[in-house]
Image (tube, rainbow, N blue to C red):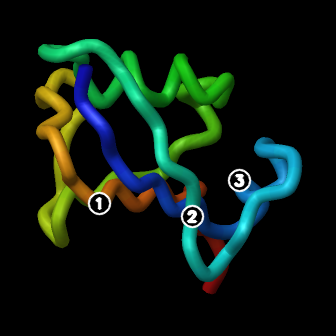
Amino acid sequence: MAKVIVKLYGTLRKKIDHYDSARGIEVEIRDGASIADLVAHLGIHESKIGFVLANGCIVKAGNTVENDAEIKIFQPIAGG
């Protein structure tokens, strides 16, 4: 199992009960899981995701989640 810290931004924070904005949440997911698997595990629909960072680098849905990574998930950004 891989353990990661997930931090949610914008309205995504409301998706997790008792979410701590400062610390995020620790999630265990199977080895070899993708970013899409992680998002599904969190119960967040893919249409609610703008972009994802893993250890500070932008990643795609098919990228593999690495053990001990810090994953930041952002909602889509719009406006002007």
What residue is at 48 percent from the left and 51 percent from the top? 50
Q: Residues within 10 Å of mark 2 (few under 14, many from 20)?
A: some
Quarter of the image where the N terminus is located = top left
Q: Amino acid at mark 3?
A: Leu
What residue is at 54 percent from the left and 19 percent from the top? 41
The image position of residue 20, as x and y in percent, is: 72, 69
Callout 1–callout 3 Cβ contact below 8 Å: no
Q: Amino acid at mark 1?
A: Glu
Q: CA distance from mark 1 to mark 2?
A: 9 Å
Q: Amino acid at mark 2?
A: Gly
Quadrant hosting residue 45: top right
Q: Establish if 11 lies above or below 42.
A: below
What residue did someone put label 2 on? 24
- Name the foreground residue: 75 vs 72: 72
Disc 1 secondary structure class: strand
Which mark, by number, is residue 70? Answer: 1
Callout 1–callout 2 Cβ contact below 8 Å: yes
Callout 3–callout 2 Cβ contact below 8 Å: no
- Name the foreground residue: 73 vs 2: 2
What residue is at 24 percent from the left and 29 percent from the top? 2
Disc 3 secondary structure class: helix
Q: Residues within 10 Å of mark 3 (few under 14, many from 20)?
A: some
Which mark, by number, is residue 12? Answer: 3
Q: CA distance from mark 1 to mark 3?
A: 16 Å
**Which of the two discs, 1 and 2, labels the residue nearer the N terminus?**
2
Question: In the shown orientation, is residue 55 left or right of residue 52?
Answer: left
